[in-house]
Image (cartoon, coloured by chain):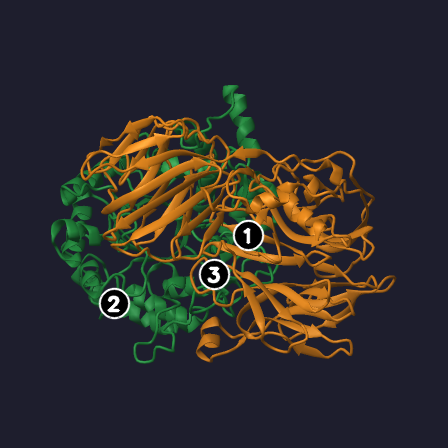
Amino acid sequence: MRTLMTSLALAILAGGVASGQQQKDLEILALVDHYDFYNVREPKDRSKFMFDTETAKGCEDILKHVLLTGATSVLWRPCSGSVMRYHSDEERFPLVVTPTDKRRVHQNESAVNGFISYNTAKIDIIREMMASIAASGRVPGVHWPFEETHHMGWTFGAWNLEHPEYWGVTKTGQVWSGRTSLAYPAVSDHKMRILEELLERGARHIFIDAWRSGSWSPRFEYVKPELERWKARYGTEPPSDSRDPVWCKFVSETQHAWFKRVKKRLESEKIPLTLGVQLVGDPDDPRDQTLISRGIDWRVLVDEGVLDGLVVMGIAWDVKDPFGSTEKIYRDIVARCKGKCKVYFPIQAYDFTRKSFHSYAKATELTIAEVTAKLLELTRDSGADGVVLEVVDYNNYPRAVRRELRKVSPYKSIED
Amino acid sequence: MAISSSVHLASCLAVCVLACMPAVSQGADWVSCGTARQLTFGAGNDSEPVVGPDGTIAFQNDESGRYVIKCLKPGGKPEVLVDAKDHAFQPTWTQDGRLVYVVRHPMETAAKAIESGSEDGANLWIRQLDGTQVRLTKGLWCDYTPSIAPDGKTVWFVTTRGRRKVGDGAHLASLDLSNAVGDVREYTFAAYSSFSSAASPALSPDGRLLVWAQVDGTYGNWRLHLASTSKLTTSVSMTEGSMSALSPRWSPDGKVIAFTGFRLGDPGWGVYVMDPPAGLMRRLEVGPGNSRNPAWSADGKRIVFESNRSGLYKLYEVDVDIRPDRARGRKATRVQSRVEGTLVVGELGSAPRLRFADGDLITAEKGPVGNWLFKEPKGLDFGDGPFYVKATFTLNKVKKDPQVVVGGYYPGMMIAWQFHTNAEGKLCFTSRSPEGMYLAANSLSPIPLDVPCQAIGIHEPDGTLRFWVEGQQPVVMHHPKAAFLGQARMLTIGGSDGTVYPLDGTVHAMEVGRGYPQGVEALPTVEELFNQEVER
């Protein structure tokens, strides 16, 4: 399979890259949550699945579909929350198999009844896919959302469950397993060991998605080390409002220390560290979404040279002037980053924030392909380095959109 | 113990009700324990112990990379009791020495299992006295955490059968052990909705009460729930939402419950014991490391548990001396139910009014989107007590945006509570946590269009939301904690307090009050449930 992918890559490079000399191509980061493919049925036989996501073939087929977008980097999800999608030593104990650990709630998707088990699959999915992506000529990387908690079934990771002493705490003293705080050195070390597992499996781009992790919040940072640090600095109790910018800024110092640790680890191997942030409007707004809701100040990380790339997952564009407002925000962000890191802007397929290409299309009466073309043009004109596709599922970037994406990609001649 | 008339208050109609916050205290000297003794050694982790009537301990061990069930007879060495092709785990003894357990059947992949029509999921098995192993349930779902009823005839467990949506967890079930495969009775919570799950049901020794662990909502912790077996849909939380509590086991005399717990400040998981009617809870000092899954000896004088103090989880036992003291029984906080505000609908087009408990009336101001605003309404300062909202309204159209039927606004807290519709046409009842997060309960199906529909939402002090929508099953969501509500700033009808979320429809009637509305039972308290048991 991998040989086939290599041949495909060479063929594409031969035909594609050569034809893209007039304008500089854009980087296209494709985020992949391969779990999202589990329920795609064979059109001719609805009783069959198109992708068996626990197998090498299923994952390779997913990759082929993803590459139709012209992706230059494929960032594969290494975990669903703390349930790993590879044979992780960090998240293996106790045996994480439905339902041996009764504390873990099932992921009861109708099609698979909670039995998908990537961490115990016969293949090590991340190792397999990092190799396949590399063989295709793309940059293999991971799309790492830490403890992803928008479904509680994904909340209870094995390591978290073994270490309640590091759980997040709210201002009212509620402990919660969905989050372990980076304020504890043991948690920071645990995350670094996961990083090592990912690197050892071939990840050459570490993309940390601060947005997708709903638990990553100053709301859960009222932990002992942070309370003591606050008291030592201010001599008072911390603000009761976890969205207080002063508290969020304070919390961000701890988060940033971990990012710096990651950066230091990656630097010697020249592996890029990128951060995903959401709904950026005015980049100088002190109530920045990522700061207030995640306790991470991307501007500080950019200024201090910690990030190699800033992935803007969503733009707070104005429905009254969709492209004009987008253009301004793009230019402001690029200016704010001052060339200190790469910048990627979104081509969003999902409309959770009502800022996707569907919403642009609704606001402008253009087709989604036309919207995509315009956004790619704005991205290029702003001086940004590329775009991010969040996330590539089965045909959520339809053929016409994929065609527009490939026009700005080195991989122009892929047959779709 | 004498039963006060308060036992029957639960069925009285909103006269004088009990707040059900589980105000559990440490207590001083009602429980003590000795030094833990290690019972098992060697390779692999030993966990989920259960002690049989003859003192034999069954447990699971993962030395081979999959779980097998072993047993340890008093004075003996561990022996393998069940070695299935895949994981065999979570054992429980019957009174006559048979063993019920779970087998997670092998499958190549989940997709292949579905495509082949497999009925081999995680299912219950029984090991008979002669060593033969018989399957009790089948199906490509999970039946797990079994426990045997005191009469030995029934196994209680949780199951994911029928749970088909993202976030659907497991619900309670029971199986008559005299039957072979099938004939499972399922019990959905009143809380039945997405993002709820149960585990580890255990029946009290007299068979009248069921305790289990339940988790609700994305940010919830596992909590212990208690209900009468005659009414499993009405459960009360026995542990506060601020802690995590699992694996409850009744003491042989039915007076005390041991469980696995973690509270802020604990060094790790611990063995807790609780004397529910007395409101006492204590973490036993059983030694370092995580200590979990307590199991009582038949005489109630020892607790066996697993601990990782040596690196691997191994079994330990500890002598316990517990002196339940029902005389300490908590004094329940009584809240006087009262209608605080009633909507008085005006003539066609004229402004509605709001009548307060003292008879005063205020007239609404018209909002910018046809909504009505009652400013500075009296009597809606519910503090940390229960309150309710009751409304009858007609919805004309489902919209992508929420449509607010009625909402309460408080200083520093936008929309402290409300009824609103969502994009699916369901009705949602929301209130707030102390951190300002939304607590929500949604109707199970869309509400009908163009006809009046009545809904009642009750906000309990412990964060539980009870929600009835006419013609639908009730919904109960247990959230960790509820916000304190001072004096209200505004009450809105037919939209938010601004220019968004107008209702395309009509509000015919609305009532808001403290306590419970007429015709709705208060939740029983833990004390009432225990006392009812005693009375019978």
Q: Nearer the viewer, residue A189 or B231?
A: B231
Residue named by callout 3:
A107
Residue named by callout 2:
A12
* Disc marking residue B273: none
Q: Which chain is orange?
A: B
Residue B102 in which image quadrant: bottom right
* Co-location on one chain, circles 3 and 1: no
Report, in whole angstroms, how far the alpha carbon at label 3 lies from the one at label 1: 26 Å
Q: Is residue B44 left or right of residue B440?
A: right
Q: Chain of mark 2?
A: A
Residue at position x 51%, y 25% in the image = A230
Mark 1 or 2: the one toward you: 1
* Co-location on one chain, circles 1 and 2: no
Q: Nearer the viewer, residue B279 or B53?
A: B279
Report, in whole angstroms, how far the alpha carbon at label 1 lies from the one at label 2: 63 Å
Residue named by callout 1:
B234
Report, in whole angstroms, how far the alpha carbon at label 2 lies from the one at label 3: 38 Å
For badge 1, the amino acid type reads Thr
Residue at the extreme left: A365
Q: Nearer the viewer, residue B8 or B279?
A: B8
Residue at position x 70%, y 38% in the image = B329
